[in-house]
Image (cartoon, helix red, strand yellow):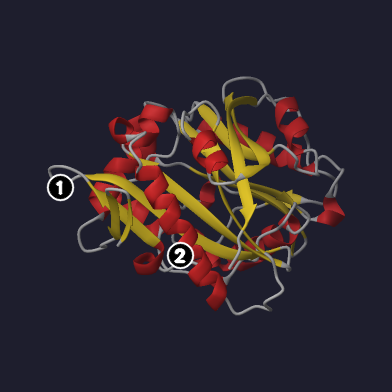
Amino acid sequence: MTPSGTIATRAFDPSRDWSSAAELIATAHLHDGVDWIPTAESLAHDWSPEPGFDLIADAVAVDGRAGRLDGVATVDRRERDGRMISHHVSIWVRPERRRRGLGTAMLEWAEGRCREAGRAWPRPPDWPHVIGGYGMLGVPGHAELAAHHGYRTHRHAYLMLRRVADPVGEHPLPPGLEVRPVDPSQFRAIWDADVEAFQDHPEPATRTEADFEHWFTSPYLDPSLYQVAWDGDRVAGSVLTSINPDENERLGVNRAWLDHVSVRRPYRQRGLAAALIASTIRLLAARGVEEAALGVDAENPSGALRLYEGLGFRRYHEEIGYRKELSL
């Protein structure tokens, strides 16, 4: 599809590539210490169509030997902060095939595809377009590839971990709030409150109806793990948690992910986030879970990093975000 030297990419083929792509990503991540291990089924869910992602146009593969894939790349795009279009690039290369031009070939394809999609994006032409991606600190190749193609470090994020059995302390709910079991009829209210809360984060993403459908059709959805604080019929804040048994088995862990932690602005600075996280930890302990994990932007303006460290989470991976302006 797009050659770079002797390396050629081809369009991702959903009729035959799901298992091979999941195997490649799992192999790369286990080698690099990245804690996302997809299955063919979960990958198909993660890469389902949405306004900023069309699998046929926005994913490519590099064929290897014996029917395996040696490389996969995707690009997606969405509006951020109501004023820019952000194009995100993800690249995976089989460990023994690195430093041979595969990453370069896929990044060149990605930049070309982002320019093409950017020119067709239905927004004013004066909106800036940026392109970037994340790489785990300590994994060779990310920084060099990014620097060679003119990307700069944009931000840092941490993955954090705590033992569920460690004491979490007493963190009562603020007066007037209560936590109730979650019913599917409440999904929309919970989602809308989470979207509202995240508008105060740097460059908040514009979430779409496809994002809502994607979240609540996850194969690992378990609302019984959710801790949602209510003020009457209004959501004050929530911790949305999931457990991926397939991933845990591959990693050899017993872990839950606190995927979203959010508190709406009127309820902040009252200890609500700490109360909901502490309640989540106790719930996970009762379920026999051993570890709790979450991700946080190092520059989160709400002080989330300090909050999580105060609740016993420790940093165990650091991710570097790379970005440059995209010339259409």
List the residue tagged with mark 1. 67
Q: Residue at x 75, y 59 (%)?
A: 199
Separation of marks 2 and 1 at Cα, in angstroms: 26 Å
Residue 51 visible to the viewer: no
* Helix, strand or loop status at disc 2: helix
In the figure, is residue 237 to the left or right of 220? Answer: right
Query: Label 1 crowding class (10 Å Cα cut-off): few <14, some 14-19, many 20+?
Result: few
Residue 300, quarter of picture: top right
Q: Secondary structure at mark 1?
A: loop
Q: Kindly identify which residue carries mark 2.
A: 113
Q: Is residue 75 toward the left or the right of residue 265 in the image?
A: left
Q: Name the outermost residue toward the top.
A: 166
* Mark 2, other Cα within 10 Å: few <14 / some 14–19 / many ≥20: some
- Most foreground residue, 211 or 225: 211
Question: Which residue shows up at 69% across the image and 79% down it?
Answer: 124
Depth check: give the residue in front, 263 or 315: 315
| Three-letter code for the amino acid on which mark 2 is drawn | Arg
First-in-chain label (2 vs 1): 1
Q: Is residue 67 visible?
A: yes
The structure residue drawn at horizontal position 59% and vertical position 46%, both measured from the top left corner, is: 150
Whether the residues at callouts 2 and 1 have beta carbons within 8 Å, the answer is no
